[in-house]
Image (spheres, coloured by chain):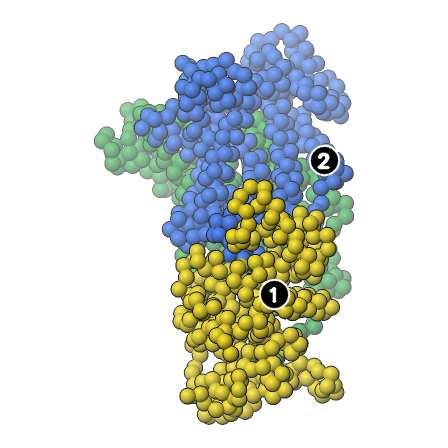
Chain colours: A green, B yellow, C blue
Amino acid sequence: MSAPPAPALLVPEAPQKAESIFHRNLATFAANRLAMASAVVVVLFVLMAVLAPFVAPHDPNETDLFRRMQPPAWLPGGEWSYALGCDALGRDILSRIIYGARISIFIGTAVILVATSIGILAGLASGYLRGWVDVVISRIVDILLGFPYLIFAIGLMAMMGPGLWNIILALAYKEWVIPCRVVRGETLVTRELEYVEAARALGASRWHIMLREILPNILSPVIVVSTIRMAHVIILEASLSFLGLGVQPPTASWGSMVADGRAFILEAWWVSTFPGLAILLLVLAINVASQGLRDAFDPRFQE
Amino acid sequence: MSAPLLDVRGLRTVFETRAGTVCAVDGVDVSVHRGECLGIVGESGSGKSVTFASVMGLVKSPGRIEAGTILLDGCDLRGLTPKQMRAVRGKDIAMTMQDALTALNPALTVGEQIAEVFDAHDYTLPRRGSARARAIRDKSAEMLGLVGIPSAESRLRQYPHEFSGGMRQRIMIAIALACRPKLLIADEPTTALDVTIQAQVLELITEIRARLGMSVVLITHDLGVVAEHCDRVMVMYAGQVIEEGPTAEVIAQPQHPYTRGLLASIPRPALRGQPIRPIEGQVPDLIGLPPQCRFYSRCPLHRDACLAPVAMRSAGPNRRVRCILSGEPVE
Amino acid sequence: MSLGKLLERILQLLPVLLGVSLIVFAMMALTPGDPVQIMIGDQSVTPEQEAALRRDLGLDRPIHERFFLFVTDAVRGDFGESFYHRRPVADVIAERLPATIELSLVALIVALATAIPLGVLAAIRKNSVLDRLATVGSLLGVSLPGFWFGILLMMLFAVHLQILPVSGRIGYSSEIVPITGFLLVDTLLRGNLSAFWDALSHIILPAITLGLPMTAILMRVTRTSMLEVLRQDYVTFAEAKGLSRRRVLFRHALKNALIPTVSVAAIETGSLLGGNMIVETVFGWPGLGRLVVESIFLRNYPLVQAAVLFYAVTYVLLNFAADLLYTALNPRVKL
């Protein structure tokens, strides 16, 4: 029948160099136009947040009672220097949205960084060391997974009181579980591969193997999951702020701006609408971009 | 000889892919006579499965039948509406698949999977009510008994995963044969099985064929199976039929270099001690094929004349071959 | 699944439940500051009242004893006294629960009823306009902040079009004496059809808001698993048997495709719990979620603690049920 296949190589082979795979995946991602456009939107939001004092037309906390609920520029009574209109205290909505991006993006990034770092360490320890370390960490993970996310965060915020750092803590306390599970699963597979065994045989220390041999090869799925989670964290922060459990007034945050506008939906729809639109845009952009990342970086989604 | 049961002429089935149009079946003629067992041999990608998926009307997008006629008992299957075709499938032509484990639905009981064939096709049953249900159950149990599954009545309530591999294969055959089809297409019926069970399943098919007087198409890549069970054999390569004839003759005197290669590559007791000779090279890419003989690149005897299109040639009574080195042109 | 296996699985739940209550307990016990002072806030109380509250909360005992008391009390359904309502916490929660359950169930029904048909249609007509719309829709569904979507719906249907009420559970004119606490059921039991329509019109917008993310997720899961199933040999074999298209799609394909959908639905039902707080706040829905949010601002900690524990235990049990359901639906998986 057909020719027998060439004999398989019996020599243990290190996986393809992590860097070259990374570059190939990056190229796949760049070819996905929708994902690239979304990544650009995310970058624009980040720039807007960083450069807020330079791009915001007004001081976000400056009240002007003569401009109470001034409509957006294209409606009668609006003016272009207050493009998206003003809220019930006469503050410029556009400027508050620009400053609000700082809160959303800072909290989102901080939570993901803290949670991913903890999750990676815990996941590596759990998956590589096994034994009692694995038992303890897995139990904690199971228990934390027993809480609906928002309720866990609300419970913590209720006890700790509102505030920027408390939000980060409240969200990170549970968020690390997700990267931890991903890392643990990948580590369990990777630790059995030949190149890891080779490193072990050469007498490399446990930390060297975990951080230098295993981690670089399982980083892709962790990055993909982290970006997807970023979108969730931003919505959670906005939800906490909406309930009044987030950053406190007068600091502008998108969630609390939507809450502020709730009382005026009869006469000033724009107060709630635009900050919510900002959340939607950013979260949607992150979701689309991270789907592109997943398609490019996760071999399970490659055809 | 009377008109064949199944008569396929000039069948051409293509698949649109991003890389181009793949011509999986290219001008295939097949005829199956009443009561006969026809073996179809070829490696994967030779078009043998697609040919019979076309006959069954089961070619799915992005594939489509581009040309050809498919006559079953004189009726053109390509002219039927989807609904009329459904009435033919499972009743007049039935099919078994390679692996019963994946072909049986894991979430439905074996009884239901047999019963639904009767429910769809058997018009002799009582119209409705418990009489119909009972009749269907009896017939289902009878089918399981026919394929040699003991205590059939109680096993109808079990799920496929509760049976052994050989039993599942028998169940699949029972389902296919439920409405006593005129033609059974058995697609690689033994590939997924252990050697001992392979023999049992083939025995079963041969025995039931004789009992019910139906025709069988046995698709396989195992020439040994063909030698033992088939009256005639058809060898396919790269979407074309390249040799056809009575099994004994083809095996004794293969005409096409590919058939000879196939025979040389199977271990035979008679040739013990001689090395097995695999055919060098690979099946050509089916996209944008040149008009030449498709076996050209792998053929030990190829010559310049092979670069022209090669038509089927006659090589004695009931024998055809697609090689310019044998047979004579058909006018 | 045998009874023994089931018992074993139930036993495995216990450490998780214990851990969950430990965390809920720790949330309050380890918080910096004196909970009694925080709870009293600027209300004026006598030293006796303060001491009574302290004793009531068990704050005069060592911490491990307090945890033991917390768990044993919780098992008995005793969560202490709601400072604000001057009634047992358990009673206050029980009173608000039917509204929350009713809203969650309707949201679940809305989600299942839209997600499954859309997911199946999108899979059958892969790459059609409908499929693309469904994909975009599900992406929007998971990206929309629920509180904002609720307000948008409110502005459109209640304020602008004025075809649905803005908030609440039922209009004043159609209030009825409760029987089960589920207004949609009670109004029918009382034979008051206009009150039923009134209750229904009140629940539509909150239920859609609450169910939206779940709809998006379930639609995606259904589509993916249906596509996967349609590629399976048993679907081809079912077609080869000459069965009707309906039977192939629904009996053979859908039955298998729904296995992941149903278990994801059970898990996602747990996430409705969190969404409840938001949606009930937006629509002034008098359920448990809104009670918790109000209680946080009233510093009614025993109630918040009890509610968080209640939510967490329900969530764990729902996940457990999802697991069992998956097993029950899938004859191949044997425990």
Q: Residue at x 35, y 29 (%)?
A: C157
The residue tagged 1 is B212
Quadrant where the N terminus of chain C sits is top right
Q: Nearer the viewer, mark 1 or mark 2?
A: 1
Any part of residue C323 in sight:
no
**Disc 1: which chain?**
B
Same chain under badges 1 and 2? The reply is no
The outermost residue toward the left is: A76
Q: Residues within 10 Å of mark 2 (few under 14, many from 20)?
A: few
Is residue B109 something that shows in the picture?
A: yes
What amino acid does circle 1 point to?
Answer: Leu
Q: Residue placed at 47% from the left, 25% from the top?
A: C281
Residue A38 picture location, percent across and down: 42, 50
| Residue under pointer 2 | C10
The one nearer the camera, A235 or A303, is A303
Q: Chain of mark 2?
A: C
Q: Nearer the viewer, residue A232 or B69?
A: B69
In depth, the one of C117 and C30 nearer the eye is: C117
Per the image, label 1 sits on a secondary structure element best described as helix
* Residue at the spot 54% in from the left edge and 65% down from the top edge: B182
Tell me if residue B161 comes above or below residue C159 in the rendering. below
Q: Could you tell me the amino acid type at mark 2?
A: Ile
* Residue B148 image offset from top left, x and y in percent: 70, 59
Q: Quadrant of the C terminus of chain C?
A: top right
Label 1 and label 2: CA atoms lie apart by 55 Å
- Neighbour class for label 1 at 10 Å: few (<14), some, many (≥20)? few
